[in-house]
Image: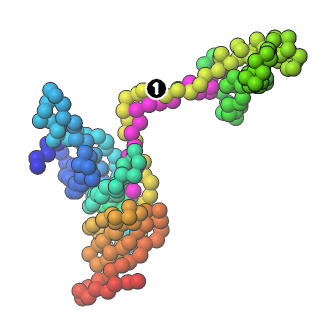
Amino acid sequence: MYVTIIAFAFFFSAADIISTAEFNHTGDLLATGDKGGRVVIFQREPESKNEPYSQGEYNVYSTFQSHEPEFDYLKSLEIEEKINKIKWLPKQNAAHALLSTNDKTIKLWKITERDKRPEGYNLKDEEGKLKDLSTVTSLQAAQVGLGTRDVVINLFRKLSVASPETELTQEGLSVLCPQERERGDRNVVNQEAKEVPVLKPMDLMVEVSPRRIFANGHTYHVNSISVNSDCETYMSADDLRINLWHLAVTDRSFSILCRDHSGQSSALA
């Protein structure tokens, strides 16, 4: 299988050297990590009629900074930002998720797409200025056209089904609902001025957000991570230890295998 990655760069440095790469489960996304702590995600282009052999090409989908250089003052050790390993999690919903790690810290990232934006919120006054958020309340019945007047009309409509001879007149409505007589026309104007939020299309935007940070689980450099089949736990390994993590717990891990410097291994409960 030949994979062509389309990338353009004018200057290369040591931080741009790719240190790891990982496909997702469908092969549509390819995540690469470099020595500068960055993760670049490539997306496979779909095959088109004009270019039938372009399915193997991968273009840049998203780029984000995963790790920064750190310093361990207790051990007087500088921790590099280089990405040692990347692992994709099985897709559970519309979002993607992956784990990335440097020598000491493992991070869980969420990748989402957004191609629509909400518009039409009643957050601006008549002059177009933003209102004070403390004065903005939730939609009420009168704001969506369900005032007392409409409740009475709906009630009579139900009665007319049982009794066709029942007829609602303007005089009858004014008698049953006198408080609506004065503000009847005013309600219609106010209801027409109300805006209902709608979703409008926009350019595709990929958002990457950190979800969990798993730190202080290894004494030596982390060199491998692996997601378990339950999609809730994963394992991380250094030269002498294998730890078991839960994706929802960041401050605790279980050592399932420990090996001393003499080469002897022991399984821990």
Vertical order, 70 against 31 (above or below): below
Q: What residue is drawn where x is 34% and y is 55%?
A: 90
Q: Number of callouts in the render?
A: 1
Q: Position of residue 46 (x, y in %)?
A: 22, 36
Q: Is residue 220 left or right of residue 167?
A: left
Disc 1 marks a residue whose amino acid type is: Lys
In this view, the residue in front, 243 or 150, is: 150
Between 81 and 188, the residue placed more toward the observer is: 188
Which residue is found at the position 27% from the left and 60% from the top?
Answer: 85
For label 1, the SS is strand
Residue 121 in the magenta stretch? The answer is: yes
Please say if 29 is above or below 259: above
Relative depth, front residue between 199 and 214: 199
Magenta highlight range = 108-125
Residue under the image location 59 percent in, 25 percent down? 196
Q: Is residue 251 left or right of residue 127?
A: left
Label 1 Cα neighbours within 10 Å, binned few <14 / some 14-19 / many ≥20: few
Residue at 34% across / 56% down in the picture? 89
The picture quadrant where one finds residue 10 is top left
- Write down the residue under mark 1: 200
Image coordinates of residue 66 in percent, x first then y, are 35, 52
- Counting from the top left corner in percent of width and height, residue 55 is at 17, 38
Is residue 155 visible in this depiction of the protein? yes
